[in-house]
Amino acid sequence: MSVWFTLFKKELRHGWMAFLIFLILQLLLMALGIFLNIRYGQDAEIWPVIIGVMLSILLLFYVPVYLLFNVIQGRKTFHIWMQNPLPGWSMLLAKLSGAFVYFIGTMIIIGTYTWASLTRITEMPQELSLFRVTILALLILIWSGIGGGVALLFLWTIQRTMRSRIGKWAWIVLIVGIILYSLIDAKFIESGAFAFLTDWGAIQNVTVLHFVMPHGAPTSMSANFATADPIGLTMGDLVLDLVRTLILFILTARLTDHKLEAS
C-alpha cells in the first residue's frame, strides 16, 4: 500500500501545474462576475450566478481534460511510470485518484461561489432546496468525471500501445477507430437490443422536481413538469453506462499490464 501512496503523491505533484492553470482561469472568471455585480449593482447580480453555473457545467469535462494535460506533460517520464511494480489497475487508479483530488477541490471552490451567488437572488423559489440541488449536481459531476476519466485513459493506453508498433500512424488509426465506434454505437442505440437493456426504471420529471423541492412545488410548476417531455433517462441507462465504464477500465488495465511498452 505504501508503494501505491508513493505513486499517488507523485501523481499529485505531477498534476499540480494543470490544477493551478485551471484554478487561475476560474478565479479570473469569478472575479469578473463580482466586478460586474459591484460595478452595475442589483441590475447585474445575475452575472455571478451565470458564471458560477457556467463553471459548474464545465466541470463535466474537468477530469478528462486534466488527465489529458497530465499524460501530455508526463511523456518524458512515461518510461519511469511504466517501471512501477504495481499492477495496471492500481497505477491507473492512482492517476484517477490524483485527478479526483483536484476535481473535488475545484468543485468546492466553484460550488461555494455558485451557492453564495444563488442565495443573493431574491427571485429564487422559496421551495427550492439548494442543498438538494447541490447533491444532485455532485452526483452528476462525479458520475461524468469517472466515465470521462476512464474513457480518456483507455484512449491514451490504446494510442501508446499502437505507437510502439506503428509509430506516428497511431493517431490516424485511433481517430478512425473512434469514428467507427461512434457509428456502431449510434446503430446500437437505434436497435431493439439497446431498448431491451435500458427501457426500465424511467426517471420521471416530477421525481426530480420533488427531490429538489422536498416541501412541495407550486401547483403550476408541478403541472408543467408532469406534462413536459420526459428527461429521457432511465435506471437502465445508468446501469449500462456503469457496465461500459467497468469494461473500459478492465481493458485499460489489461493493456497496461500486457501490451503497453515504455516507448
Image: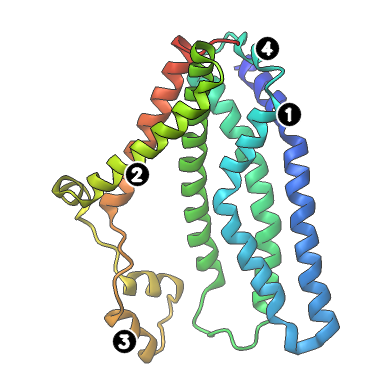
Q: Amino acid at mark 1?
A: His
Few, some or many residues within 10 Å of mark 2 (<14, 14–19, 20+): some
Element carrying mark 3: helix
Q: Which residue is at the front of the view, 226 or 254? A: 254
Residue at which label 2 appears: 241
Q: Are marks 1 and 2 in contact (CB under 8 Å)?
A: no
Type of amino acid under label 2: Asp
In the image, taking residue 35 as reference, residue 234 lies left or right, namely: left
Which residue is denoted by mark 3 in the rendering?
Answer: 223
Q: Of all residues shown, which one is farthest toward the bottom?
A: 220
In the picture, the quarter occupied by the C terminus is: top right
Q: Residue at x 37, y 91 (%)?
A: 220
CB-based contact (under 8 Å), mark 3 and mark 4: no
Identified at 44% across, 26% down, the residue is: 173
x, y percentage for residue 186?
29, 47
Q: Earlier in the sequence, mark 1 or mark 2?
A: 1
Q: Which label number is shown at residue 14?
A: 1
Does 53 appear above or below 145?
Answer: below
Q: Nearer the viewer, mark 3 or mark 4?
A: 4
Q: Quadrant of residue 185?
A: top left
- Measure the alpha-carbon separation of dots 3 and 2: 31 Å
Q: CA distance from mark 1 to mark 3?
A: 51 Å
